[in-house]
Image: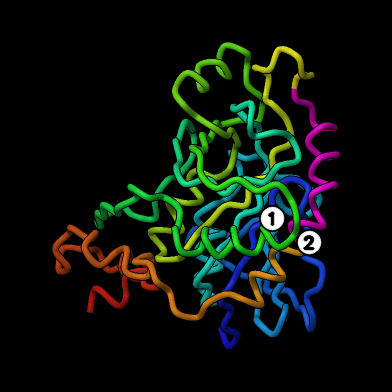
Amino acid sequence: MSETVSLAVIGGSGLYSMSGLQEAREHILDTPFGKPSAPIVVGTLEGRRVAFLARHGIGHSITPTEVNYRANILALKSLGVKCIVSVSACGSLREDYAPGHIVIPDQLFDNTRARSRSFFGEGLVAHVSVAEPFCEDLSSQLEAALRQTGETVHRGGTFITIEGPRFSTKAESNTYRSWGMSLIGMTTSPEAFLAREAEICYAVMAHITDYDVWHASEAAVTVEMVIRTLNQNALAAQEAISILARDLQPERKCHCEDALADALITRPDAVPQETRQRLDLLIGKYLK
């Protein structure tokens, strides 16, 4: 791939395109794990090459479980992406995180059941560290960009990912609250974990659309409610991404780019050649 992209945006519900991209063109890519959700649009934003990927496909035709997370992340890796910002719709499990607010979470709880969570297997074992599942450096830069928009922004909180596509029952929602969860959504796992395996910095811009179903004085979450709030926040998201593209620091102050350095446990000569070839983009620099 001749084009190198430093920043990518994965748009979720309500954000299906990225305005402001100049000289944009589509990349129709394939990976050893299949095709990504949609063609990846690459253009120039604030002087930086930026990629946009619609997580749920053109026209929102892919459920959270059906998203090919591995193909999405590997396709972005093939473009040279170093940083990913995920724009995600979510419900709030806290009174102080209100609909319309934007949150940059710092922890993640995976409560999904039916997804491929790793690139590894088939003869190559890797145990990547995800104690801090989101890149702190990128999250800080994203927070700084968001605060310039004038929106209400919160930093911190645990994001629980459920399987979906249905919304929670009240019993489930109250259980997650009792566990200390702050936000609830359907796509951040395994996306964040795969980004770490791909040694890409990853942060979430979580747009709160509702109070899930636990709040006694608020209406239960509906698709109409989600889309209405996301449409209101879309301009803020676009503005924040433009600011981030302008101000993104070229030097990474984290260890995301070396996440696999101490994670590969399989003896190199025991790794099947087919697996080496499939994962060369991720492990080529480690398995000489």
Q: Let me know if residue 241 is in the magenta part.
A: no
Residue identified by numbered label 1: 11
Disc 2 marks a residue whose amino acid type is: Ser
Q: Secondary structure at mark 1?
A: strand
Mostly what secondary structure, the magenta segment? helix
Q: How many marks?
A: 2
Residue lying at 64% horizontally and 34% vertically, measured from the top left: 97
Vertical placement of 255 versus 219: above or below? below
Disc 1 marks a residue whose amino acid type is: Gly
- Locate residue 3, reporting x and y percent: 60, 85
The image quarter in which residue 288 lies? bottom left
The local crowd at label 1, few if under 14, some if 14 to 19, many if 20 or more residues have their Cα within 10 Å, is many
Residue lying at 57% horizontally and 51% vertically, measured from the top left: 68
Q: Which label's residue is closer to the chain start, 1 or 2? A: 1
- Locate residue 245, reporting x and y percent: 65, 74
> In this view of the protein, which residue sits in the foreground, 279 or 12?
12
| Residue 17: image tag | 2
**What segment is highlighted magenta in the picture?**
221-238
Q: Secondary structure at mark 2?
A: loop
The image quarter in which residue 28 lies? bottom right
- Locate residue 146, reporting x and y percent: 67, 58
